[in-house]
Image (cartoon, rainbow, N blue to C red):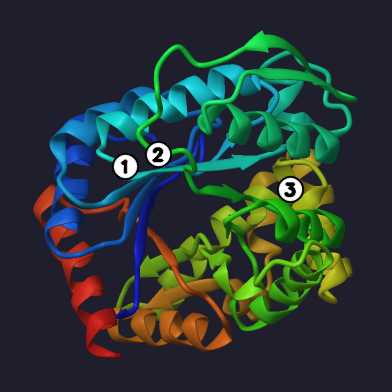
Amino acid sequence: MGRRLGLYLGRLPGFDKRGFDRRELIECVRAADDCGYDSFWMAEAWERESFSLLAELAVRTRGIGLGTGIINVFSRSPALIAMSAATLDEMSGGRFRLGLGTSGARVVEDFHGIRYDKPLARLREAVEIIRLLLAGERVDFKGECFEVSRFKLGFKPLRDRVPIYIAALAPKSLRQLGEIADGWLPTLWPRRRLNEGISEIGEGARRVGRNAGEIDIAPFTNVVVSEDAGRARAVARLPIAYYVGGMGDYYRAMLERMGFAEEAAHIQQLWQRGRAKEAIRAVPDYLVDEIAIRGSERSCIEYIDEMYSAGATLPIVPIPVEGRTAEKCRLIESFMISVAGTV
C-alpha cells in the first residue's frame, strides 16, 4: 500500500472572519476524492454539526473515507453516536470512521453546560457501548458514567465494526487508546516525537494482547504554505497559541511533558489574561518549527515525509484557508501527488 494522506477542516474562532462556504468545502473534498486522498475529517467544537455535513459528503463522493475529527463523548449519548455512525456508514457504503475524544471543560462545560467528569472512564464506556450496538447486540449496561437498558438498533448496520479513532495526549489516555481504539488522532504533537506517543499506545495494546502495528497513527497537522518563511512561521503561531492558551490545560500539559513547560505556561498566562496578540508572539520560533509544517510546497512535503519516518501512517492536512477554490483544490492535489511520489 502506498503512503496515505488525509484532509480535514478545522478552524479557529476569531482568526478566520470569513468562515467557510459549504459548497466550497464539498468541491475541495470531491477534489481530494478524485486524486486519491484516504479520508476527510470534520471537526465540530464550534463548527457545523459533523454528521449532517458528512452525510451530504457521503452522497457527493465515491471513495474517500469520511470521519468525525472529533466529536466529544459528553454532548451525545453512546446510543445516539452509534445510531449516527451506523446511519452514516450505511449512506457512505462503509466509508465512515468514528473519531471520538473527551474534549475538555472549555468545550463541554462552557459550550454545552455539561459537567466535565471522569473523562477517561466515560470514553472507555462509550466505546464499549457503541461497539456492542454496531455489532447488533442488545445492550444492558451499567457503568460509572452510563446506564443503558434493553437497547438495540432497529436496523442491521452495514458493518459490525466501524473503525474508532481517539484523540489522546496524556500517557494514561494513550495507553487506554492502545487497548480500545483503531486509530490515534493527535493534534499539535511535535512531528519528530510521534514515537513517544506510539510507545505509550503500544504499552496499552500489549496489555490486552493486541498488535499495536494495526493501530492507525493519524496526526492532524498545522500546515501553512507560503514562499515567505517569516510569514509562514507567523501564521503557524496562531493555532499553537490558541490551543495552548485557550483550550484548557491538556495542550499545555503535553508540551510541558516534552520539555516546553516555561514556554507553554507563559503562552497560557498571556492568553488567559486577555492578551491574545502577545500570546501569539510569545510562541518561540523553535516551538513553531517542532510543531508546524510551513514554508514552500516542497518544504511542507519534506516535513510530512518526516512524519512518516517518525511513525505516522496517515498524516492529515488542512484545507487551505486562503485563496480561491480552484487554488485550494490545486494545492490539495499537489500535496497528494507529491506524497505519492515520495514512495
Q: Which labelled disc corresponds to residue 245?
A: 3
Distance from the alpha carbon under mark 1 to that under mark 3: 38 Å
User: Which mark sits nearer the N-terminus, 3 or 2?
Assistant: 2
Residue 132, percent across and down? 62, 31
Q: Quadrant of residue 139?
A: top right
Q: Amino acid at mark 1?
A: Gly
- Confirm or deny contact between disc 2 and disc 1 (CB under 8 A): yes
Residue 41, percent across and down? 40, 47
Circle 3: is it few (<14), some (14-19), or many (20+) Cα within 10 Å?
many
In this rendering, is residue 340 above or below 343? above
In this rendering, is residue 90 above or below 279? above
Q: Which residue is more in the foreground, 118 or 134? A: 134
Query: Image point 23% across, 35% down: which residue?
Result: 57
Instruction: Tell me if 76 is positioned left or right of 159 in this view.
Output: right
Q: Which residue is mark 2?
A: 159
Residue 329, percent across and down? 15, 57
Q: Quadrant of the C terminus?
A: bottom left
Q: Quadrant of residue 201?
A: bottom right
Q: Quadrant of the N terminus?
A: bottom left
Toward the front, the furthest residue is: 137
Q: Amino acid at mark 3?
A: Gly
User: Which mark sits nearer the N-terminus, 2 or 1?
Assistant: 1
